[in-house]
Structures are given as structure tokens and as C-alpha cells.
Image (spheres, helix red, strand yellow):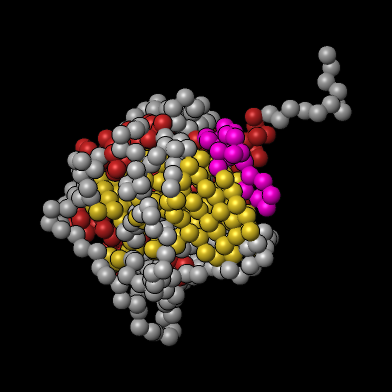
């Protein structure tokens, strides 16, 4: 039957991929530093070479003679940006170093457009791009003193790993990359070629790395990072570390890469300190690893080997070439039953209700409190700045138990507006009355039965909220330690 010009046309796969490409281009601009509206992104101290001022004193990270250094990089180039100095110093001291790449960065068509001066939507080209970035990573590693044996590529989908962590477990359909159109690892040189794009595959690979290498220090992306792959790697890594804690218990240091217009100042300033965003700059929280001028310059040489990225984002990437590297020893937040619970600060820190806030704590006009009340986890959010506004929220919670496969634990999403709410578990609807939502002027409270969460020992939690039309700061991924609750 002839096709009518007036009949609606079904979107083709190519059209869908074009829409995805346009979305990624928009996101690329955000991720390389154009997200000016991210709150608290500017550091409290910004280096000005024309007006020297005392730099903040911070504790220093030291490497020990028996250390084994594991770097978990979300994409090729993150290993140089965040830990290029640590890698050089460790190798100079004869310490074992392994770098593991979570993805090959095969969805960054924005960078390839600059690099090759051509744009393509072909799946095979996206895989080729991932291979190119892996080759660049090997060259960068060689510049810092690594050998090919020191670098491992997992090959999971760029821009897809947070979706895997949240929803793709067990019998769920594997994730399909919007650019490679693959739902398994497509790289022959990966640690596990053809591994399915599901959570169990990633967790198994990470646990294998941890048990084989037995690191004493692990460097991994930060849970507050606005790039979803960076946040996802932190969540997977922490889960894997809990699973192997009877064998190894390394120190863990998180590095932040994407957060609005941070870092500042932009561009190449070898003498400037690498300072955290003001939102996360609580007293004593961050540790630094000082770099010598030679280490900083070798870090630049290694970064230039990531040619696809350097050609597209030179000024932004050079903003990480500072006099030090910066790490946050992110901690779980104890939540003890029978107490008033904890205040969850927008920085991801938790303090017992009634305790003094840490010096430098970021306040955004809202109070977030988590507590265990009987057989339920209760999260309340109150708008201090708009006490009569309707407060709405979306929260995501995923539990962990040592005696239960992580993929079998519930993953609960609650979306609550001013008058109703809905509950899902891995995108499947649950009865609305499976959780309780209580509202009052300027506040909202969500009560989730611990049984619905699988009676967890630990709980991953993140939440977004609004007071009227005003968005409150997003609570970054935190871990609540509920081991005393059951």
C-alpha cells in the first residue's frame, strides 16, 4: 500500500540516535563546565597570581612503603586528571599500580567532532572511537611510567552505567548503548569481552580486580559528581568493596571531576592549588597530594596523549593541572534506631540531630532528616526559606545486605508531589500505599518500610526536592549505615 504523505511516520533508529546525539551534545556542554547554575561550585579560595594570598592548609595524603595503588577511572583521561601525580609518585617509589577504566568513553561524539572534524552516527564508528580512547589511555599511561599490563579496560557503556546500577539486574533486559547499539562489551581487549550490560557483570569484574590486585589504597570517582558514569562507578565500587571486606579493607579516596564551573580558575595554572567547591569544603574533609613542578608538567604531557579530549576541552582539562591533587575520604553515615536520626547536608555529610554542624557546612535553606522509626526509614525535608510552600521530592533508595546478592535487593523510587505520590521498583509500579507520605506547609515526609527495602544493613540514598517552584540542592548519593537496625 502506498505510503501517504499525511500519515505519521514511525521514527527510524537513525532518527532516534540523532535525537540522542543532540541530547548528548547539550549534556556535553554542561559536563565540560557550562553548568553555571550548580550551587556552591566556586571554591572558597580562588588563586589569583596578581594578588597572592595565603592558601588554605589541608592534611596531606602520604604513600606508604607497602601500598598497592588502584585507580578506578570512569573514562580514559580521568586517571590523569585526578591521579596523575599519585601514579607518578607511586611508580617512582616502586609501588604496584593498576588503573582500571570503567568505560571507553565511546559516547563522546562531541569530542570526536573536534578531533576528526567529522560527525557520524554509525554504531561501528562509536566502537572505533572507544578503541581510540583506549589507545590514548595506554599512551598516557606510558608517559607516566605505566606498562600495558598495568591498565585494564572493562568496556561498559559510556553514559549508561547509572541506568545499569539503578535498574538492570537479574532478569532485567540488558542496557543497550545509544551509540554503539551494543548490549554486551564490544571490545576484544576488555577484561571480560561480551559481558552483558547488567549490574552483575560490572560487580563481578570489580570484585575480581579487587581480589586479584589486593589494593591498600583505592582512588575512585566521587558520588556527588554530576556525570552519571562517575557517580555510578563510586556506587559499584563501594558495593564491591563491601562484598570483599573479609579479604581486603583498603583506604578509599574519592576525586571530583564534574561540578558546574568548578574547578577555578580555568586554564593552565601550575602554581594554583586544586581547591574543592565551596559546597563540599567542610573543615578537615579533603586531603591533598602535593605535586612537584616536574610531576605537574609530566601530567600535562600525559593529558595531551588523550588527544580526542584535549582537542575539544583544552582549557577545562588544564584546570586540573595544579600544585596538588585533591581527594575526599567519603564515609558512610551511621543511622542508629531509637535516636532522632541524622541531618543530611547538601554536601552529602550526615551529622546527628542536635550536633553542631561542621565548620564550613553549606546551608541551602532546607533541612533534611533521616531516621529509623520502628520498622521504617523516614526521610523528611523542610523548606526553611519558604515555610508555606508545597515541598515535593523524588528519592531513590537501594539496600545492601552481606547475606543477599546485591542484584536481588529492592531498588525503590518514590516521586511525591503536593497531593499524590507513586512508588516503583526498577520501573515497575508498586501500590501507592506501600509507602506513606505526610505533608504539611513547607515540609514533606516519606516513610518507607524497612521490609520494602529488603531490611538493609546499608542503604544508598539520593533525593531531589522543590519548595514551590524553587529547586533545592540535590542530595548527592549517600550511604546510610543501618547495621544497628536489624
Residue 445 on image: x %, y %: 56, 54
Look at the image and say whether residue 367 sits in the magenta stretch.
no
Residue 241 on image: x %, y %: 29, 43
Does 158 sit left or right of 439 as displayed?
left
Q: Is residue 9 above or below residue 46?
A: above
Q: Nearer the viewer, residue 270 or 72?
A: 72
Does 306 sit left or right of 40 as displayed?
left
**Residue at 32% in and 48% down:** 484
**Residue at 20% in and 41% down:** 246
Q: Nearer the viewer, residue 102 or 302?
A: 102
**Residue at 20% in and 50% down:** 216
Q: Is residue 7 above or below residue 48?
A: above
| Residue 236 image-quadrant placement | top left
**Residue at 23% in and 50% down:** 250
Residue 177 on image: x %, y %: 52, 34
Does 10 sit left or right of 37 as displayed?
right
The residue most toward the left is 65
| Residue 89 image-quadrant placement | bottom left
The residue most toward the top is 1
Total count of labels: 0
Q: Nearer the viewer, residue 344 or 183?
A: 344
Residue 230 visible here: no
Specify the quadrant that holds the C terminus: top left
Span colored in magenta: 416-435
Look at the image and say whether residue 420 sits in the magenta stretch.
yes
Specify the quadrant that holds the N terminus: top right
Residue 483 visible here: yes
Q: Nearer the viewer, residue 239 or 299?
A: 239
Residue 223 on image: x %, y %: 42, 53
Amino acid at each position: 500500500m502506498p505510503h501517504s504523505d499525511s500519515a505519521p511516520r514511525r521514527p527510524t533508529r537513525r532518527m532516534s540516535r540523532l535525537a540522542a546525539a543532540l541530547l548528548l551534545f547539550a549534556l556535553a556542554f554542561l559536563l565540560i563546565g557550562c553548568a553555571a547554575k550548580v550551587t556552591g561550585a566556586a571554591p572558597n579560595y580562588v588563586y589569583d597570581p596578581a594578588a597572592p594570598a595565603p592558601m588554605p592548609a589541608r592534611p596531606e595524603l602520604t604513600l606508604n612503603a607497602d601500598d598497592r595503588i588502584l585507580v578506578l577511572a570512569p573514562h580514559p583521561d580521568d586517571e590523569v586528571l585526578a591521579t596523575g601525580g599519585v601514579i607518578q609518585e607511586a611508580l617512582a617509589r616502586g609501588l604496584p599500580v593498576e588503573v582500571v577504566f570503567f568505560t571507553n568513553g565511546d559516547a563522546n561524539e562531541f569530542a570526536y567532532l573536534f578531533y576528526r572534524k567529522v560527525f557520524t552516527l554509525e554504531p561501528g564508528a562509536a566502537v572505533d572511537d572507544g578503541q581510540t580512547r583506549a589507545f590514548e589511555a595506554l599512551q598516557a599511561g606510558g608517559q607516566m611510567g605505566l606498562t600495558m599490563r598495568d591498565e585494564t579496560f572493562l568496556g561498559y557503556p559510556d553514559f549508561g552505567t547509572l541506568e545499569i546500577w539503578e535498574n538492570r539486574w537479574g532478569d532485567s533486559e540488558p542496557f543497550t548503548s545509544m551509540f554503539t547499539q551494543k548490549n554486551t562489551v564490544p571490545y576484544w581487549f576488555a577484561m571480560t569481552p561480551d559481558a552483558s550490560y547488567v549490574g552483575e557483570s560490572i560487580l563481578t569484574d570489580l570484585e575480581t580486580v579487587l581480589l586479584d590486585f589486593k589494593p591498600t589504597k583505592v582512588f575512585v570517582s566521587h558520588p556527588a559528581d554530576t556525570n552519571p558514569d562517575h557517580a555510578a562507578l563510586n556506587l559499584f565500587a563501594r558495593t564491591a568493596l563491601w562484598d570483599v571486606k573479609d579479604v581486603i579493607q583498603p583506604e578509599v579516596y574519592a576525586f571530583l571531576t564534574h561540578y558546574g564551573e568548578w574547578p577555578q580558575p580555568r586554564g593552565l595554572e601550575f602554581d594554583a592549588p586544586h581547591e574543592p567547591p565551596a559546597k563540599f569544603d567542610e573543615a578537615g574533609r579533603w586531603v591533598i597530594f602535593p605535586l612537584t613542578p616536574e610531576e605537574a608538567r609530566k601530567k600535562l604531557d600525559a593529558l595531551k596523549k588523550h588527544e580526542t579530549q584535549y582537542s575539544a576541552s583544552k582549557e577545562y582539562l588544564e584546570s586540573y593541572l595544579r600544585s596538588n591533587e585533591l581527594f575526599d575520604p567519603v564515609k558512610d553515615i551511621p543511622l542508629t534506631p531509637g535516636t532522632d536520626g541524622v541531618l543530611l547536608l547538601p554536601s552529602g555529610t550526615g551529622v546527628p540531630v542536635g550536633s553542631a554542624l561542621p565548620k564550613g557546612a553549606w546551608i541551602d535553606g532546607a533541612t533534611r532528616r533521616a531516621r529509623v522509626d520502628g520498622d521504617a526509614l523516614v526521610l523528611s525535608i523542610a523548606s526553611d526559606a519558604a515555610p508555606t510552600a508545597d515541598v515535593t521530592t523524588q528519592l531513590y533508595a537501594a539496600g545492601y545486605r552481606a547475606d543477599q546478592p546485591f542484584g536481588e535487593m529492592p531498588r525503590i523510587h518514590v516521586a511525591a508531589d503536593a497531593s499524590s505520590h507513586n512508588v516503583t521498583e526498577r520501573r515497575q509500579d508498586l501500590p501507592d500505599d506501600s509507602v506513606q507520605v505526610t505533608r504539611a506547609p513547607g515540609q514533606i515526609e516519606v516513610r518507607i518500610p524497612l521490609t520494602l527495602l529488603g531490611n538493609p544493613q546499608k542503604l544508598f540514598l539520593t533525593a531531589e526536592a522543590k519548595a514551590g517552584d524553587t529547586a533545592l540542592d540535590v542530595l548527592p548519593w549517600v550511604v546510610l549505615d543501618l547495621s544497628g537496625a536489624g
